[in-house]
Amino acid sequence: MPMNIFNDSNYITLKRLALCTGLVFSLLAAVSAQNAAAPSAQEVISKVDEYMALAERIDRFNGAILVARDGKPLVSRGYGMANVEWDIPNSPKTAFRLGSVTKPFTSVAIMILQERGKLSISDPACKYISDCPAAWEPITIRHLLTHTSGIPNYTAFPGFLEKRAMMPLGANELLADYKSKPLDFAPGERNSYSNSGYHLLGVIIEKASGKSYAEFLQENIFGPLGMKQTGYDTHRDVIKWRAAGYRREGDGFVHAPYMDMLIPYSAGALYSTVGDLLIFDQALLTDKLLTQKSRDEMFTPFKGNYALGWGVGKRFERASTSHGGAINGFASQFIRFPDDKVTIVVLSNVQGSGVDKVANALGAIVFGAKYELPRERKAITVASTTLQKYVGDYQLTSSIVAAITFDDGKLWFKIDGQPKLELFPETETDFFMKAVDAQVTFVKDESGKVVRMQFKQGSGSGIPAAKIK
């Protein structure tokens, strides 16, 4: 579960840490729509083909996409390889790990149980937890759904991703890891992305339903909707058309670090296809899974732009609901425009892929808004004495420090739990990465001293990080 700083599991977009399971959720920047009629289907297809051809060649996009309008795919295609070793290409049938795109399914499961009278999202979480800590007594299920519980994010614990994430820890064993930690803040005080909260929701689903998390979702969501290529990912099961997960190294790929799939659980352990996610999207426009009352409640923001398992806001001046994901070897972005009946899905089997940037561009194409085509980035030569001035530690978030080092004549970027990544200079202060869709700009004060850097991943707005050492 690395970070969308490079892996939602820290998929750095860094706005939020998600579960190393791609458990990072990031809102894409809104782009104003042009005052023009919606492009025709053929225009959309042509522009998507143009964009994706460049994304595959220049950005080395590897995965599958879906662009749908009125419930019907306009474009549904695969790019690159599902399995590099066997030269098996990605296709719309390819099954990808979803990372944090699991969270909307967990939210729907909770709402189904509420409609059946098995629980209420106003219930104290402690009602379903044995030996519940006293500090948790004010926490409700709603707090868990909205990332406002204050329970610390277990995937951000020191060394967790490197060691603990490889162990086959059952739900109660992992619960014990974060159960013993003090709250980060009083419940309801603020929003802070926590995979622990969504892990706990899986425990509650099992307690309230009498079924395992995987069984409940299969029997109440996947089965009834006919989502035949969606389920709980395990290393034991044979899953047809399952993609292998990779990360970039140099100009090639290596296998992503191993993670036992008991770890992401209800915060990020599902797999699916672009087509099955469209089925899910369409069901949420009807009463097939939930009543209108429950859907309205689920899509109502609590604090900030996060509702019950969904990011809610506007893109291209249109209402949208969405979620992103990142987990070892995979990245995902799922965006819905319910009023316009438009759906965008981008799934990749390369961690750190710029799925948010791709999804944003595809949405812009559908609505006739402005977007940028992928472009070649060329590195220049910068003097070693200049590069060495950037060496130091930079505070990206309250809990994340990026170390900039100089080695073998090159500048490197490193975050705990993530591989060391080379920075390539475009100018003396602007650098980009090849392994992930990210860039860094170093900022100096009037005296020429480096005081901070600006980190940007994908289509995010960027994160200022002060130099602390």
Image: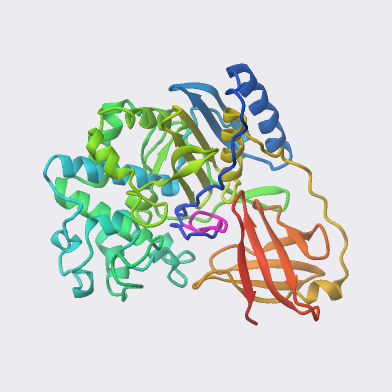
Q: Residue most toward the front? A: 35
* Residue 248 place in picture, x, y as percent: 65, 51
Task: Say above or below: 60 vs 342.
Answer: below
Is-magenta flag for residue 202? no
Q: Residue at x 68, y 37 (%)?
A: 55
Q: Say whether residue 266 is left or right of residue 163.
A: left
Q: Count every numbered label the image shows and give the total.
A: 0
User: Is residue 251 visible in the rendered structure shown here?
Assistant: yes
Q: Which residue occupies 72% across, 40% down?
A: 374
In the depicted view, which residue is nearer to us: 61 or 465? 465
Image height of 197 relative to 75, above or below? below
Left or right, 9 with respect to 113, comes to: right
In the displayed structure, 453 sits above or below 426; it is: below
Is 209 left or right of 168, judged from the image as shown? left
Closer-to-camera residue (199/163): 199
- Between residue 130 and residue 145, name the one nearer to us: 145
> Percent x, y for residue 376?
79, 44
User: In this picture, which residue range is highlighted in magenta?
Assistant: 1-13
Residue 235 appears anywhere in the view: no
Residue 460: x %, y % from top left: 59, 52
Give the left or right position of residue 98, taking residue 60 as reference: left
- Which residue is located at x 23 percent, y 64 percent? 139
Tell me the quadrant of the picture where the C terminus can be found. Answer: bottom right
For the stretch drawn in magenta, the main secondary structure is loop
Quarter of the view holding residue 127: bottom left
Q: How is the image coloured?
A: rainbow
- Which residue is at the front of the view, 437 or 71? 71
Residue at position x 55%, y 38% in the image? 316
Q: Position of residue 449 (x, y in %)?
A: 77, 79
